[in-house]
Amino acid sequence: MRRTPIVVTATVAGLVGVLAFHTTPSRLDPVSLGPTPTPNPTASGPGGSAEGASSPSPPGPAASSTPASSTPASTRTVDGPVVNYNYGDLSVSVTVAGTKITRVGIASLDDFGVPRSEQIDQQSIPILEQEALQAQSADIQGVSGASYTSAGFEHSLQAALRTLGVQ
């Protein structure tokens, strides 16, 4: 009977501590591998081709400063920054014709050799690519069970679209 107030007080204190505990999600930071990507109209991602590329513009600052709307017939491809998403690194490749996204793919992917992460990425990345094409933006739904992959994909996609001047 003498322990009851102690047990009740400890229980209430523990409950308050658990309810007051707040976590913050980890930030996804691009891995610095060099200068900011510039549009390259003849570049293609893995497994892709440069077919359909028309009116190539010279690479460099002049190409990246030209808004996408000024050359609506051009096809350009840009790789987004490499993003570490806690279970690996990935980079998204985006091809646009004018302001329309025509292809979204993976420019680079490293799952650090973890089979479970590879399996999750093999299932989720095709879904994320389709969503980006349908949405015509980086405003896409994440894939359930692949939250980190989805966030990394969206981050790299958004940066690539910004580089292209599409979003």
Image (cartoon, helix red, strand yellow):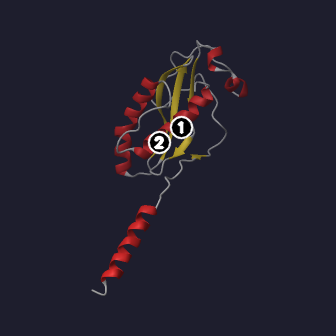
The amino acid on which the numbered mark 2 sits, given as a three-letter code, is Ala
Circle 2: element type: helix
For label 1, the residue is: 156
Between 73 and 134, the residue placed more toward the observer is 134
Q: Residue at x 31, y 87 (%)?
A: 2
Q: Earlier in the sequence, mark 1 or mark 2?
A: 2
The percent coordinates of residue 1 (x first, y second) are 27, 86
Between 34 and 68, the residue placed more toward the observer is 68
Q: Is residue 97 above or below residue 163?
A: above
The amino acid on which the numbered mark 1 sits, given as a three-letter code, is Ser
- Which residue is outermost to the left? 1
The percent coordinates of residue 86 (x first, y second) are 47, 51
Q: Is residue 163 left or right of residue 152?
A: right
The percent coordinates of residue 16 (x first, y second) are 42, 67
Q: Is residue 17 above or below residue 25?
A: below
| Quadrant housing the C terminus | top right
Q: Residue at x 47, y 28 (%)?
A: 104
Q: Residues within 10 Å of mark 1 (few under 14, many from 20)?
A: many
For label 2, the residue is: 151
